[in-house]
Amino acid sequence: MTQTEAPRIDKYLWAVRLFKTRSMATQACRAGKVKIDDQPVKPSREVHTDMVITVQTGPLMRTVKVCGLLNNRVGAKLVSEYMEDLTPEEEYKKLEIIKSQAGLRPFRKGRPTKKERRELDDWFGWE
């Protein structure tokens, strides 16, 4: 790739393995879960080096800095050459808490009750 070619943001997020498929990255952009400078972006937005991108993937709000441009998906070991993870440690701790509490509800015992859903929403700060 030459310096003048800048990839689309959905393709970049897929290439650095933030999303499993490119269509998932496109849907996240359309849903407003991908932001640059706290502004939602369209999937066709071009990516440039030193750009800081915020991505909501499930309960985790990831912040990454673009270190290099690429159009094709790379191996997991090479991702650090193209992306720097700036996600605060608190986000990863929140994810660990969610994973640890996943086993509290008995398996195949139905959906959470309305009260349980409200408690979870209050605990996470969701509306």
Image (spheres, rainbow, N blue to C red):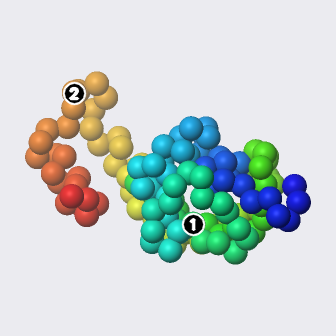
Q: Earlier in the sequence, mark 2 or mark 1?
A: 1
Q: Mark 2 = which residue?
A: 110
Rendered location of residue 43, percent (x, y): 56, 51
- Rate crowding at label 2 as few (under 14), some (14 to 19) or many (20 or more) other CA atoms within 10 Å: few
Instruction: Write down the residue under mark 1.
Output: 53
Q: Nearer the viewer, residue 126 or 51?
A: 51
Residue 59 vertical placement versus 102 (above, below): below
Farthest residue, direction right? 2
Can you say which quadrant of the picture contains the C terminus? bottom left
Residue that appears at 88% across and 60% down? 2
Q: Amino acid at mark 2?
A: Gly
- Cα distance between the residues tagged 2 and 1: 37 Å
Quarter of the N terminus within the rendering:
bottom right
Measuring from the top left, give residue 81's x and y in whole percent. 80, 63
Left or right of 71, for residue 116: left
Answer left or right for 111 relative to 85. Answer: left
Residue at the top extreme, as displayed: 108
Q: Quadrant of residue 107?
A: top left
Q: Residue at x 66, y 60 (%)?
A: 46
Front-most of 38 and 97?
38
- Residue 101 in the figure: left or right of residue 48: left
> Residue at coordinates 80% horizontally, 59% vertically from top-left?
5
Instruction: Find residue 66 and report its image quarter.
Output: bottom right
Quadrant for residue 3, please give it. bottom right
| Along the viewing direction, whichever of 99 and 67 lies nearer the viewer | 67
Given residues 110 and 60, the one toward you in this image is 60
* Residue 51 image position (x, y, % from top left): 64, 72
Q: Is residue 46 in sight in this rendering?
A: yes
Q: Is residue 64 left or right of residue 7?
A: left
Residue 40 vs 115, above or below: the answer is: below
Expressed as whole percent of the image width and height from the top left, the position of residue 62 reads: 52, 62
Amino acid type at mark 1: Ile
